[in-house]
Amino acid sequence: MEKQKKELKGVWQLYSVKENKLERLRNSCPKCGPGTFMANHEDRLTCGKCGYTIYKNKKK
Ligand SMILES: [Zn+2]
């Protein structure tokens, strides 16, 4: 968890530019509430505020 927080600080600024795309996904942080969009990573979603991470179900 701690490592992901550090990664996100740099990544989040890129994602904030694409806010419209994130909004389309309707991924809001369960901790921060609606209106807080989560960064969409390849295998997970991460909140830019609190660092809450949701792992996508990816099984192969
Ligand atoms: Zn959050």
Image (spheres, rainbow, N blue to C red):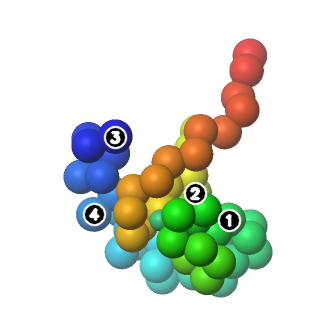
In terms of sequence position, does the residue under pointer 1 or pointer 4 come before the other?
Answer: 4
Residue 2 visible at all: yes
Q: Residue 10 carries which label?
A: none
Helix, strand, or loop for circle 3? Answer: loop
Q: Is 20 or 45 nearer to us in this picture?
A: 45
Helix, strand, or loop for circle 4? Answer: helix
Label 1 is placed on what type of residue? Asn
Which residue has dot 4 on it?
A: 9
Label 3 is placed on what type of residue? Met
Report which quarter residue 2 is drawn in: top left
> Disc 3 vs disc 2: which is toward the camera?
3
Helix, strand, or loop for circle 1? Answer: loop
Which residue has dot 1 on it?
A: 27
Which residue has dot 2 on it?
A: 40
Q: Do the residues labelled 3 and 2 touch (CB within 8 Å)?
A: no
Residue at 48% x, 82% y is: 17
Residue at 46% x, 53% y is: 52
Instruction: Indicate the position of residue 29 as horizontal and vertical percent values.
Output: 58, 65
Which residue has dot 3 on it?
A: 1
